[in-house]
Amino acid sequence: AHGAFSPDGNRLVTIQRSSQLRGRPLAVVWDVATGEELVRWEVSELGGRGEDVTLSPDGRRAVAVRVAPGGWQLVVWDVETGQEMHAL
């Protein structure tokens, strides 16, 4: 699994393979103090594979690169909801 801590160290975002999603990548936000899973989302509905993840300086956005049909994409998600905000 690839991961990144929030700037305050309270959350960890990981990207890992999910057996429930036939090996496709899944992003998960964890509460570091409790180990509780806060939110999860599929990284690519296109069957791509997730790569390293990083967080914005304010910890509100997760950014990763995925492989999708047609090439690489830089993807930005809202950490609170898992909603994809941008794909470039």
Image (cartoon, rainbow, N blue to C red):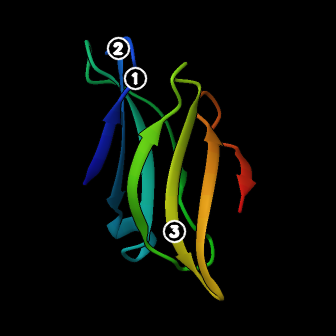
Q: Which residue is mark 2?
A: 10
Q: Give the side of residue 71 with respect to residue 59, left or right.
A: right
Q: Is residue 46 above or below residue 66?
A: below
| Secondary element at image label 3 | strand
User: Which residue is drawn at the image coordinates 62% and 56% (left, top)?
Assistant: 75
| Mark 1: amino acid | Ser
| Secondary element at image label 1 | loop
- Give the image quarter of residue 78: top right
- Give the image quarter of residue 24: bottom left
Q: Quadrant of the C terminus?
A: bottom right
Q: Earlier in the sequence, mark 3 or mark 2?
A: 2
Q: Which residue is mark 1?
A: 6
Q: CA distance from mark 2 to mark 1?
A: 6 Å
Query: Label 1 near label 2: C-beta < 8 Å?
Result: yes
| Mark 3: amino acid | Arg
Q: Is residue 62 above or below residue 50?
A: above
User: Which residue is drawn at the image coordinates 53% and 60% (left, top)?
Assistant: 43
Q: Which mark is residue 69?
A: none
Q: Which residue is mark 3?
A: 66
Q: Give the side of residue 60 with respect to residue 5, left or right.
A: right
Of residue 57 and residue 42, the one placed in the foreground of this image is 57
Provide residue 44's location: percent of width, then percent of height: 57, 67
Provide residue 46's location: percent of width, then percent of height: 62, 78
